[in-house]
Image (cartoon, rainbow, N blue to C red):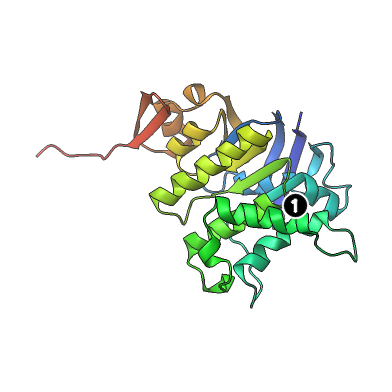
Amino acid sequence: MTVTCKSVSAKRGGVEVLHDIDLVVSAGTWVSLVGPNGSGKTTLLHSIAGLVDATGDISVAGVTPRKSGRRAVARAVALMPQRPIVPDGVTVRELIRLGRTAHIPRFGSEKAHDLEIVDRVIARLELEDFAPRSATALSGGELQRVVLARALAQQPDVLLLDEPTSALDIGHQQQVLDLVDSMRCEESLTVIAAMHDLTSAAQYGQRLVLLDRGRIVADGPPAEVLTADRIAQVYGARVEVLDRRDGRAVLPLREREDA
């Protein structure tokens, strides 16, 4: 198994936001994390990446984040954060090149192989025109694609995505999600993505894990997890759930008064 969480709990600001999470994700699968704001999706991703001091046992591609060095963790898992921090003055190409850091020996330098990987990622995400530009001058959507490119340049076994398309228009949303899914299929990449859009989560995730108040309340195929009754209970939302050829679609329903 690529990712295993056993009895994982975590706190933010002294408040426990994850409670006894048990999760097993097999290599090469896409698991979509869904749930209301504050349900613990981001904290779970950060726990798997070793960025939160969580309790319990976590294993990622044979690495234990809490006990392993940051370089070993970075070779196993890459995180595309929701709010990336970008150093002043760095170009897009330089930012993407930072993804190779974990593969370069201490006091070593980049090899031709590292630069080839960076060039290949830039091409796949159609970022050639952006490469020489300052990363801090990009729009939110452009920066989101660049940060994904940096994560892919790490060549991780596990890719963690925290709202990967929140700043993208619908065309680039499809492009990014299709790209990640194609790389999952080609390279047995394991993807765990926190997603607000339930329809996209169902279309791309082979499995959905629904969180509510820091606990897993449903885990299974999208058709089992996404029901109108469950969404009403967890989200307090009125929706219609449709079965379509490419997966379940969740449509909000407006409350109307008869004229």
Q: Residue furthest front?
A: 112
From the top left corner, tell me how far across and down residue 143 is, in percent. Answer: 54, 62
Image label count: 1
Q: Residue beneath label 1, please? A: 52
Q: Badge 1: few (under 14), some or many (20 or more) residues near its Cα, within 10 Å? A: some
The answer to whether 127 is drawn above or below residue 243 in the figure is below
Q: Nearer the viewer, residue 253 or 156?
A: 156
Q: Nearer the viewer, residue 127 or 12?
A: 127
Residue 220 appears in the figure: yes
Q: Is residue 51 left or right of residue 180?
A: right
From the top left corner, tell me how far across and down residue 30 is, in percent. Answer: 60, 33
Task: Check disc 1 and give the amino acid type.
Answer: Val
Residue 213 appears in the figure: no
The answer to whether 207 is drawn above or below residue 61 in the figure is above
Q: Is residue 118 left or right of residue 135?
A: right
Q: Residue furthest left?
A: 259
Quadrant position of the N terminus in the picture: top right
From the top left corner, tell me how far across and down residue 252 is, in percent. Answer: 33, 38
Quick one: SS at disc 1?
A: loop
The answer to whether 244 is drawn above or below residue 111 in the figure is above
Q: Residue at x 71, y 30 (%)?
A: 27
Quadrant position of the C terminus in the picture: top left
Q: Residue at x 57, y 42 (%)?
A: 180
From the top left corner, tell me how far across and down residue 168 is, in percent. Answer: 45, 54
Q: Residue at x 51, y 43 (%)?
A: 177
Q: Residue at x 66, y 50 (%)?
A: 152
